[in-house]
């Protein structure tokens, strides 16, 4: 009896330890910083030198009392809605075009859309700036007069940049929806005499509403909390936007902690509200798309292909091509004149001892550390949350989904509140301004994504797989090492390279948290553009993109190699006798 109790207690103790491990990691990386931010909104003097716990709603009231902040709120909402509407149109167009293709054309257009998705928004925005401004690429090639592009540096231009930057969210959401449309309903509409346009507007689009709203809500949340586009365009357009106002509040002397907290809370509320609105809308409707036959409702049309290609050309080739061209100029004002082309900007960037060389090396160290830890923690915490049912794990499931909606600039501000607190000084735990704090902020951003990706992979495990292992006496460590990790190794590789490539150009947390005297690569690039050194800044950007593309390609190669190797191992593990059994393939047809 005693032995039986001991056997029961050991697995429960192991499960408890894994549960506490996951909860502790998320509490340090996510829970404590966000709680500190929320407390700052109601306890405005919590982080003052002379700490005061008197509650007040003054920070939230100040957001609406200050004209610039109020204008930033209005601008962010209106421009976010308009930009999202454009993104929904563009994403729908490209999704229908890609789903109607096959062969290399589909691969190319889908790959270019993924590239737009992975590119940092401020890289795209800076590319548009050098393309459209006076003396820029378009002005040089067409000889346009000074002031011709004034319209672009208005709210209309911001909407265009938002739409062409965030349409991939709608594209990917719509792709799966298009594949799942019930073709029987489409055929029924055509048999009833409806035209192609009527079928599209009254049957196909209503059935795609879930995918449309899902992609649109995510695009709005990303656009509303995005810091990259405001960092690139606000200094030139003088249009206040909410994420940039948080940056201003945290960068002024003395730091306005209450204002930054109030603005950050507002960003979280609006971003989360957009996703919740979509969720409640979906609960109030029913969209049945189950079909026994899988056939795409999209047809490859030349006009649709041309329009999708034009969208990707505008979204990708124009900003990146402009950045590359400007990186080859000696002097900005001489433009495309024959004697103004040089590689000197690249030689300067690659010179040893150069600040960019040092910052890129430092950033790659951050990226490697964050990628390794993100990959490992993603597997461990996802395993705990997927196969150990408890109230704690259900709560962590909600937390990981919610944190994904927190913008990077808000997470960076939260880390300042959390790790620069007065009460940490006696404990010598003030981490603000150290590499540890910046590393933790990166992990707080990417670990929730890794957990969700791994949970998706583990959700496909056969229900009795782990139970059979435990019946054979395998503990949690053995199960992880011999069963779980081999099965999710492909996803683990994906999370590693996702985190690595994202850290290289991460700007919001980097701008707020980099250690004094040791700026990251993205901060150097952003400061170079802010100093109007367009050619050198463009050269830095191209070098960073080369690093990202090399790492992304390496990741894809490793994933393909692993997938092929795993497929061969799985095929070889199948008993030959099983493969020789007769298999029914159709009525009256049998094969061996």
Image (cartoon, rainbow, N blue to C red):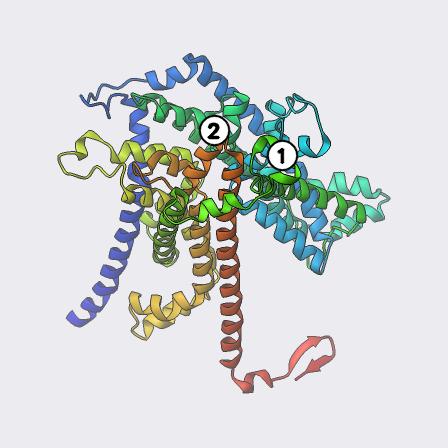
Within 10 Å of disc 2 (Cα), the crowding (few <14, some 14-19, many 20+) is: some
Q: Residue at x 31, y 24 (%)?
A: 257
Q: Say above or below: 449 vs 51.
A: below
Q: Which disc is residue 270 wearing?
A: 2
Q: Picture quarter containing residue 92?
A: top right
- Return the residue at label 1: 335
Coordinates of residue 246 in the picture (x, y in percent): 40, 26
Front in this rendered view, residue 115 or 301: 115
Q: Quadrant of the N terminus?
A: bottom left
Position of 206 with respect to 48 (left or right) is right
Q: Nearer the viewer, residue 114 or 404?
A: 114
Q: Residues within 10 Å of mark 1 (few under 14, many from 20)?
A: many
* x then y, percent, for residue 390: 33, 51
Q: Secondary structure at mark 1?
A: loop
Residue 128 x %, y %:
60, 34
What residue lies at 69% left-to-right and 23% top-to-bottom?
A: 145
Q: CA distance from mark 2 to mark 1?
A: 43 Å
Position above or below: 211 against 78: below
What number is the disc on residue 571? none
């Amino acid at each position: 009896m005693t032995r039986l109790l001991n056997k029961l207690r050991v697995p429960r103790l192991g499960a408890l330890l894994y549960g506490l491990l996951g909860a502790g990691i998320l509490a340090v990386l996510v829970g404590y910083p966000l709680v500190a931010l929320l407390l700052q909104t109601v306890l405005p003097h919590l982080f003052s030198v002379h700490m005061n716990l008197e509650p007040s709603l003054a920070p939230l009231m100040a957001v609406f009392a200050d004209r610039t902040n109020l204008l930033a709120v209005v601008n962010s909402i209106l421009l976010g809605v308009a930009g999202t509407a454009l993104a929904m149109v563009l994403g729908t167009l490209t999704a229908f075009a890609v789903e109607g293709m096959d062969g290399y054309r589909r691969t190319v257009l889908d790959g270019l859309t993924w590239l737009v998705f992975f590119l940092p928004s401020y890289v795209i925005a800076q590319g548009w700036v050098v393309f459209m401004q006076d003396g820029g690429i378009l002005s040089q090639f067409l000889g346009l007069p000074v002031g011709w592009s004034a319209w672009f540096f208005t709210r209309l231009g911001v909407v265009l940049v938002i739409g062409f930057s965030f349409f991939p969210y709608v594209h990917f959401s719509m792709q799966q929806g298009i594949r799942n449309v019930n073709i029987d309903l489409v055929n029924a509409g055509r048999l009833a005499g409806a035209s192609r346009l009527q079928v599209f507007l009254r049957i196909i689009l209503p059935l795609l509403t879930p995918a449309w709203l899902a992609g649109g809500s995510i695009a709005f949340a990303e656009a509303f909390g995005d810091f990259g586009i405001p960092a690139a365009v606000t200094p030139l357009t003088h249009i206040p936007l909410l994420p940039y106002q948080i940056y201003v509040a945290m960068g002024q002397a003395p730091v306005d902690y209450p204002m930054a907290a109030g603005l950050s809370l507002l960003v979280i509320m609006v971003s989360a509200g957009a996703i919740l609105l979509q969720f409640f809308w979906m609960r109030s409707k029913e969209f049945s798309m189950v079909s026994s036959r899988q056939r795409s409702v999209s047809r490859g049309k030349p006009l649709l292909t041309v329009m999708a290609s034009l969208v990707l050309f505008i979204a990708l080739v124009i900003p990146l091509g402009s950045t590359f061209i400007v990186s080859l100029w000696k002097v900005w004002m001489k433009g495309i004149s024959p004697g103004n082309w040089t590689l000197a900007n690249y030689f300067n960037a690659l010179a040893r001892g150069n600040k960019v060389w040092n910052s890129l090396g430092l950033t790659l160290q951050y990226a490697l550390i964050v990628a390794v830890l993100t990959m490992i923690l993603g597997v461990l915490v996802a395993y705990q949350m997927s196969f150990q049912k408890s109230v704690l794990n259900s709560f962590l499931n909600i937390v990981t989904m919610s944190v994904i909606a927190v913008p990077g600039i808000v997470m960076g501000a939260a880390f300042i509140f959390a790790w620069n607190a007065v009460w940490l000084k006696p404990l010598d735990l003030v981490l603000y301004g150290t590499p540890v704090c910046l590393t933790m902020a990166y992990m707080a951003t990417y670990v929730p994504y890794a957990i969700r990706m791994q949970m998706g992979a583990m959700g496909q495990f056969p229900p009795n797989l782990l139970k059979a292992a435990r019946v054979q006496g395998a503990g949690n460590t053995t199960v992880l090492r011999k069963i779980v990790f081999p099965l999710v190794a492909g996803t683990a590789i994906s999370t590693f390279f996702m985190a690595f490539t994202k850290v290289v150009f991460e700007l919001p947390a980097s701008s707020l948290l980099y250690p004094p005297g040791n700026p990251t690569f993205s901060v150097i690039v952003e400061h170079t553009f802010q100093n109007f050194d367009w050619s050198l800044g463009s050269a830095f950007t191209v070098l960073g993109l080369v690093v990202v593309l090399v790492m992304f390609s390496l990741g894809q190669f490793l994933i393909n190699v692993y997938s092929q190797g795993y497929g061969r191992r799985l095929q070889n593990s199948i008993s030959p006798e099983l493969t020789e059994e007769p298999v029914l393939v159709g009525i009256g047809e049998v094969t061996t």
